[in-house]
Image (tube, helix red, strand yellow):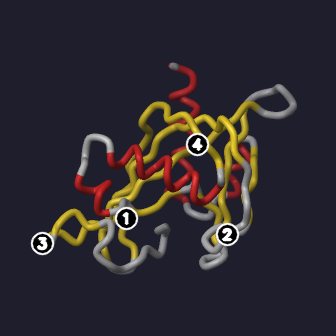
């Protein structure tokens, strides 16, 4: 997994002469248990004590297949971090920033939770299901907040 602080190593790099870290993730949603609206899942990473959307670096095989690798990586990271099985939806924003001195590009998709259950793990010790407004307030990084609006827009046009 990678996050705001990133990780070093070759995994996620696009090539020997390129220092770009490629990652993928999802804004996972479900219908609210109350029947009113939707909820989004946020993950808490104990290493950074932050709240974000599930995401992580592409493996070498995912990075080698640009047509489907990012989608596979996004679903894999959601499953690893949250235990959720999801149906991938519309592509959302691509975030670019510097983490640990390296440029990072994270592609996001909307993803509807279809099943599974969270088990705390080394990378993620808690998940929260929150309304879009509560998720926007809880996210640790300003750059993640526009993803909430991107998801809502994608769901309105679906």
Residue 59 in percent (x, y) is at 35, 62
In the image, is 137 to the left or to the right of 18?
Answer: right
The residue furthest top is 157
Residue 100 in percent (x, y) is at 39, 80
Compared to 109, does 54 lie above or below?
Answer: below
In the image, is 133 to the left or to the right of 71?
Answer: right
Residues marked 4 and 1 touching at CB (< 8 Å):
no
Any mark on residue 97, and which?
Answer: 1
Q: Secondary structure at mark 2?
A: loop
The residue furthest right is 34
Compared to 131, does 19 lie above or below?
Answer: below
Q: Which quadrant of the view contains residue 53?
A: bottom right
Task: Give me the C-alpha separation between circle 3 and circle 4.
Answer: 34 Å
Mark 2 and mark 4 lie on one chain; the one further toward the N terminus is 2
Q: Which residue is mark 4?
A: 148
Q: Which residue is mark 2?
A: 121
Q: Secondary structure at mark 1?
A: strand
Residue 98 in percent (x, y) is at 36, 70
Mark 1 and mark 2 lie on one chain; the one further toward the N terminus is 1
Q: Residue at x 49, y 52 (%)?
A: 76
Q: Nearer the viewer, mark 2 or mark 4?
A: 2
Task: Give me the C-alpha separation between circle 1 and circle 2.
Answer: 26 Å
Task: Give me the C-alpha separation between circle 1 and circle 3.
Answer: 19 Å
């Amino acid at each position: 997994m990678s996050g705001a602080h990133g990780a070093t190593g070759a995994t996620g790099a696009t090539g020997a002469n390129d220092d770009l870290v490629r990652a993928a993730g999802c804004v996972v949603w479900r219908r609210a248990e109350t029947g009113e609206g939707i909820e989004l899942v946020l993950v808490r990473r104990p290493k950074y004590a932050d709240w974000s959307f599930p995401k992580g670096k592409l493996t070498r095989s995912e990075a080698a297949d640009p047509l489907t690798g990012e989608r596979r990586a996004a679903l894999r990271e959601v499953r690893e971090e949250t235990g959720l099985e999801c149906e991938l939806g519309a592509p959302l924003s691509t975030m670019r920033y510097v983490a640990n001195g390296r440029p990072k590009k994270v592609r996001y998709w909307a993803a509807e939770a279809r099943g599974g259950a969270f088990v705390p793990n080394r990378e993620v010790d808690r998940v929260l299901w929150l309304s879009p407004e509560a998720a926007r307030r809880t996210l640790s990084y300003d750059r993640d907040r526009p993803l909430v609006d991107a998801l809502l827009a994608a769901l309105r046009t679906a």
